[in-house]
Amino acid sequence: ASGRHTAHGVRATSRTMAAVAASLALWRPRGSRSRHGSSRHRHLPKASSGRTENPPKPKPAEVFLACVPLVGLEAVGAALGDAYPNQLEHVMVLVRRFDRAESGEETSTVECYDFLPVDPLAPATAAAMLSGGEVAGDLRVRALRGVPSRRCWKVGTYVPSDVRTTRAIGESESTSTRKRSRPDAHAAARAFHRRYPSRLCLRPDRKNTCVEHAEALAEHLTGNAVRYDELIRTPPNATRGG
């Protein structure tokens, strides 16, 4: 008899434990983890990749042709203003390169590239050039605070020569496997200066003055044919600023 009562008690206890387990299962919050694994509705937070969106690329560098009075005639130019003769102008190329700061702000730097005699005020320099001779020239690079709006024309934007070649043969730049660093207009202009002939001459058959230098450098940087005589007959279109 005692054995029957014991078996009956074990069965009752088992039924009670099963009821408790079923009750707990009904009240388990959705998405909670069970002994047999996580719920299919459970979502883990995505790990951060640590990467941020790249800031927009800066604008292409701008190229300008600018004119100022010849060295030593600055006071005359200031007095005459727009009446100053074009024949006594000094012609330069300005390059305004844009950069992107870490904060995302766009900044710019302006450099001037020109070509003039080493000693422009010496009487011997004028005598040699007027007689058809040559004089030593100075290929200068100077930083400017900005681009002037007077007697200054925008002639294009900087396009690297290899990109122009790619476009000319119809090859898509996206198919090129060669990795390019960011184009640097200032570096391209300085490289041009290193190989440009450094002797000035007024003789028509070998003329090489600030005008020829500026036209050649502007075309080298932009790929556009630039003619000083034609440009000065149009209104200046440069935007003031640095």
Image (tube, rainbow, N blue to C red):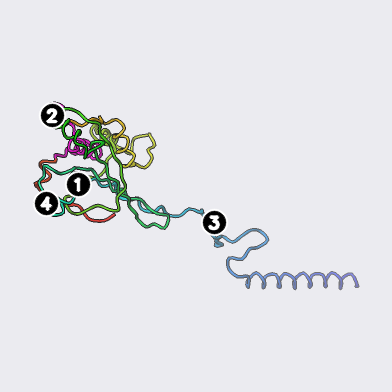
Q: Amino acid at mark 1?
A: Ala
Q: Nearer the viewer, mark 1 or mark 2?
A: 2
Numbered tag placed on residue 131 in the rendering = 2
Q: Main secondary structure of the magenta part?
A: helix
Q: Mark 1: give few (<14), some (14-19) or many (20+) Cα within 10 Å.
A: many
Q: Mark 4: give few (<14), some (14-19) or many (20+) Cα within 10 Å.
A: few
Q: Is residue 204 magenta?
A: yes
Please give the residue where the numbered disc 4 appears in the rendered image. Answer: 235
Asked if disc 3 and disc 1 are in contact, CB closer than 8 Å, the reply is: no
Picture quarter containing residue 42?
Answer: bottom right
Label 3 vs label 2: CA separation?
A: 78 Å
SS of the residue under disc 4 = loop
Q: Amino acid at mark 4?
A: Pro
Please give the residue where the numbered disc 3 appears in the rendered image. Answer: 47
Question: Where the N terminus falls, by quadrant?
Answer: bottom right
List x then y, in percent, for residue 112. 27, 45
Magenta-tinted stretch? 202-227
Left or right: residue 104 versus residue 141 is right
Q: Nearer the viewer, mark 3 or mark 2?
A: 2
Label 4 vs label 3: CA separation?
A: 58 Å
Q: Earlier in the sequence, mark 1 or mark 2?
A: 1
Label 1 vs label 2: CA separation?
A: 28 Å
Q: Nearer the viewer, mark 4 or mark 1?
A: 1
List x then y, in percent, for residue 150. 17, 53
Please give the residue where the numbered disc 1 appears in the rendered image. Answer: 66
SS of the residue under disc 1 = strand
